[in-house]
Image (cartoon, rainbow, N blue to C red):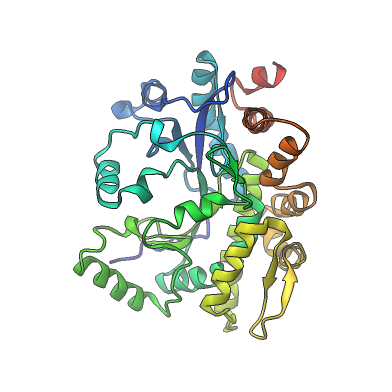
């Protein structure tokens, strides 16, 4: 398989949203109608940047190739401007959280699509319950081998990105005790989680060949690791994040991912090898981030010393600051520190319930967060939702 190397370490972002009733907080299975209407003015009657998801109450908004996270988020806002007014007409809103707090996955229709139907038929229950939402960030890789190195290194930083984005404490009307229950739901699927540490592109090709020859997968899209090389796009795809309610938080995650990739590229070019943590440490750290979020204690070296996640985050922001300045995303990178200080989505959601609110109130709050964030970025129709 050829890797279509990127000429620059540009960025692209994909955000999955749930469509909910502003009155009841329930998911609304209207994506077929909304996306059909939104796509009407485009060739083939399909919107190029608003896509269907597995379940009909969900949709995905994607960007083109962007220079930095600010440009990517403004690209998202442009597409959201095509969607939000259509939802307003229906009394509906958007929210991006890892899980919907009280929706029943077996009560909602799946999007009619050959790929989705094949996946559900093959995988059954693990796929049937994927009523979850995430954020994916693509960063351009300058070569196939650099994509592999970046994937290996990015796995060490996965807990930071996961904790910052964690937004799924509730599942099926219960507090799971986790910051990110979506993480554990998705791990029920095959070929998910922490990727194996692979030395180079040739070894990765050998792995793909084995998976295809053994009839394990049909395409590379069926490898759902938390971070993976994407040969067609020529990127490394960061896939570990929960859905994120605000565009500011999306931009912060994007900045972190882009800085990681550029850091790895620069260290590689300078001949400096980056020490990797062992596989079990990577898995343990991911568990700690999914369980305790920003309050996690991470294993940080080969001597198994631990460090508070927030402290590690501050170190990385300082390390990546020169890179962020060159990329034009310093404000977005530093916003990660604001999230760590003021609280990630899972903490904001729990605070509502701790203060006597219901899970319907939780949904309303996440929709309101999205509304305000959309309005800040000029999304058409968003300001009227903030006003009401």
What residue lies at 25% left-to-right and 51% top-to-bottom? Answer: 122
Image position of 163 with respect to 244: above or below: below
Instruction: Say whether residue 121 is left or right of residue 265.
Output: left
Compared across the picture, whether 44 is left or right of 324 comes to left
Q: Position of residue 196 (x, y in %)?
A: 43, 73
Q: Position of residue 41 (x, y in %)?
A: 37, 22
Could you tell me residue 293's position as x and y percent?
67, 56
Query: Between residues 258 and 293, which one lies in front from this camera angle?
Result: 293
Return the x and y of residue 216 as percentages of the image width and height. Answer: 25, 63
Residue 161 in sight here: no
Residue beneath the point at 36% across and 60% down: 190
In-front residue for pair 94/121: 121
Q: Is residue 103 left or right of residue 272?
A: left
Q: Residue at x 54, y 37 (%)?
A: 100
Left or right placement of residue 307 versus residue 24 in this view: right
Q: Residue furthest front?
A: 174
On-image quarter of the C terminus: top right
Residue 253: in sight, yes or no? yes
């Amino acid at each position: 398989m050829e890797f279509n190397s990127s000429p620059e370490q540009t960025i692209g972002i994909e955000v999955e949203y749930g469509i909910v009733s502003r009155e009841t907080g329930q998911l609304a299975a209207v994506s077929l109608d909304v996306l059909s209407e939104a796509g009407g003015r485009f060739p083939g009657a399909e919107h190029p940047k608003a896509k269907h998801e597995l379940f009909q109450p969900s949709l995905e908004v994607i960007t083109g190739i962007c220079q930095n996270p600010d440009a990517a988020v403004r690209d998202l806002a442009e597409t959201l401007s095509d969607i939000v007014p259509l939802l307003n007409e229906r009394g509906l809103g958007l929210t991006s959280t890892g899980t919907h707090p009280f929706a029943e996955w077996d009560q909602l229709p799946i999007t009619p699509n050959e790929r989705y139907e094949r996946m559900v038929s093959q995988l059954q229950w693990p796929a049937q319950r994927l009523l979850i939402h995430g954020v994916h960030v693509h960063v351009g890789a300058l070569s196939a081998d650099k994509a592999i190195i970046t994937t290996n290194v990015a796995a060490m930083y996965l807990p930071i990105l996961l904790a910052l984005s964690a937004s799924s404490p509730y599942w099926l009307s219960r507090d799971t005790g986790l910051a990110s229950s979506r993480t554990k739901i998705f791990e029920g699927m095959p070929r998910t989680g922490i990727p194996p540490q692979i030395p180079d592109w040739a070894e990765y090709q050998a792995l793909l060949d084995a998976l295809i020859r053994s009839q394990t997968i049909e395409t590379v899209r069926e490898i759902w690791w938390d971070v993976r090389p994407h040969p067609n796009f020529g990127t490394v795809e960061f896939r570990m994040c929960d859905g994120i309610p605000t565009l500011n938080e999306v931009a912060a995650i994007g900045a972190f991912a882009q800085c990681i990739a550029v850091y790895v590229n620069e260290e590689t070019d300078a001949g400096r090898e980056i020490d990797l943590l062992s596989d079990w440490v990577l898995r343990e750290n991911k568990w700690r981030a999914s369980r305790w979020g920003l309050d996690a204690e991470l294993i940080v070296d080969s001597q198994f010393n631990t460090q508070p996640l927030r402290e590690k985050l501050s170190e990385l922001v300082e390390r990546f600051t020169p890179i962020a300045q060159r990329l034009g995303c310093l404000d977005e990178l530093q916003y990660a520190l604001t999230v760590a200080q003021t609280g990630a989505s899972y903490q904001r959601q729990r605070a509502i319930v701790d203060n006597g609110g219901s899970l319907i109130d939780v949904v309303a709050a996440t929709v309101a967060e999205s509304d305000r964030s959309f309005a800040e970025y000029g999304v058409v129709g968003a300001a009227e939702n903030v006003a009401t």
